[in-house]
Amino acid sequence: MEKLFKLKERKTDVKTEIMAGVTTFLAMAYILAVNPGILSASGMDFGAVFTATALSSAIATLVMAFVANLPFALAPGMGLNAFLAYTVVLGMGYSWQFALTAVFFEGLIFIVLTIFNIREAIVNSIPDNLKKAISVGIGFFIAFIGMQNAGIIVDGATLVDLGAITTPGPAMVAIIGLIITIILQCMKVKGALLIGIILTTIVGVPFGVTKYAGGSYLPPSIAPTFFQFEFANIFSIDFLVIMFTFLFVDMFDTVGTLIGCATKADMVRADGTIPNCKEALFADAIGTTCGAILGTSTVTTFVESSAGVVEGGRTGLTALTVAVLFILSLFLAPLFGSIPSAATAPALIMVGFFMMSPASKIDWEDPVDGISAFLTIAFMTLSYSISNGIMFGILAWVIGKLVSKKAKDITVPTIVIAVIFIIYLILK
């Protein structure tokens, strides 16, 4: 383990890494149920998508573990799966095979961009101040996701409202779980997030929130979705637009997640670069390509990886643990499916708190840095998109530098990214 993952160099040990991996997996295991549920709306086979989700997640996370040696996990991304099912298939009328073909080509393009260091250049071109803001924004974003999943925050007359936290149900269980997790954290109990998830799952039993999912312990066949591509319309304008949308959102979601989690793990170097960044980006390129072949939407680095980082995960051993659990989930789906969202919500909310620390290092006194950082954080959470947060943050920073006559601070890659964002907004 030491030779493979350099545990001592990163001041960690096997126990910490495995616990961090379990925590990350439990925080993101919902994707095993949610992704098939969303994609099945497009006509895809639920069981086949479940197997594709577990396998593509495991493959991509194994690449992250052994090639990048970073503690981040990957799975089919939320938002992109909804875009495939509800926009491309149900909205535009294309087949899910056509949509998977766009995902497949996106993955191939990502592999090429990664090989030629283009994606790494994008990561390195983001200003240091915005890197910190991205970490903070992801903290708010992941806490918001946790609150929504548990019903603590719901739709209301003002877009969002407080859920029924005083009525027996998921929201109340999540609040109880949050109190338990906070107590464990204040007592400095090792593995507080993981223990919190387990105890909250138990608390949910008498409330009727935690229920045995049932079902078969054998993996469903992947045959209905395996290598189901449709190449007939790949030169159409619609195909190019769909593929670009997948490409754009996935690229900046992954970039944002890598920056945010690496910042929290104190892995960002003094020059603003992230160790093994190219290899990390290669993991999601491979994951996306393999995922399309197996039968699922774009695979990306998950913001829930920050849950494991908070627990002390610093190497690929954390990612390896997640990958192994994804493989085991193929045979233990009923058990993992029994963990309610209310049980993982407290962990996600606490991760939001842990991701706040870089905010103190943002230069709020400088209008350019302060405003761009604020917009990054605000748009990331309120528009429910990491890429939107990065987009408005970068554009505000570039405009701010130009009008304050500090254009020399803007690098060529940053200008290119800003232009791409403007084109995206025009075409959107």
Image (cartoon, rainbow, N blue to C red):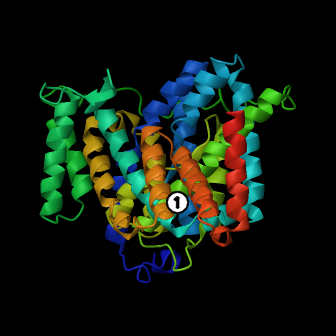
Which element carries disc 1, helix, strand or loop?
helix
Question: Image point 49% across, 54% down: which residue?
Answer: 323
As drawn, is 50 to the left or to the right of 159?
right
In this view, 162 is above or below 13:
above
**Above or below for 29 versus 233:** below
Within 10 Å of disc 1 (Cα), the crowding (few <14, some 14-19, many 20+) is many
Q: Which amino acid does label 1 sit on?
A: Leu
Q: Can residue 320 be seen in this view?
A: no
In the displayed structure, does residue 211 sit left or right of residue 294? left
Q: Which of 225 and 90 is in front in this view?
A: 90
Pick the front one: 16 or 402: 402
- The x and y percentages for residue 169 are 18, 26
Quarter of the view holding residue 335: top left
**Picture coordinates of residue 192, whole percent (x, y):** 21, 58
According to the image, label 1 marks what residue?
A: 258
Q: Residue at x 42, y 70 (%)?
A: 314
Residue at coordinates 58% horizontally, 67% vertically from top-left?
68
Whether residue 89 sits left or right of residue 185 in the image: it is right
Q: Does 149 appear above or below 3?
A: above
Tell me if I can see residue 149 in this picture. yes
Depth check: 62 or 139 in front?
139
Residue found at the very far bottom of the displayed protein = 9
What residue is shown at x 67% (from left), y 47% (from top)? 421
Q: Position of residue 239 (x, y in %)?
A: 78, 31
Residue 73, image x and y in percent?
Answer: 49, 54
Comparing 173 with 332, the one in front is 173
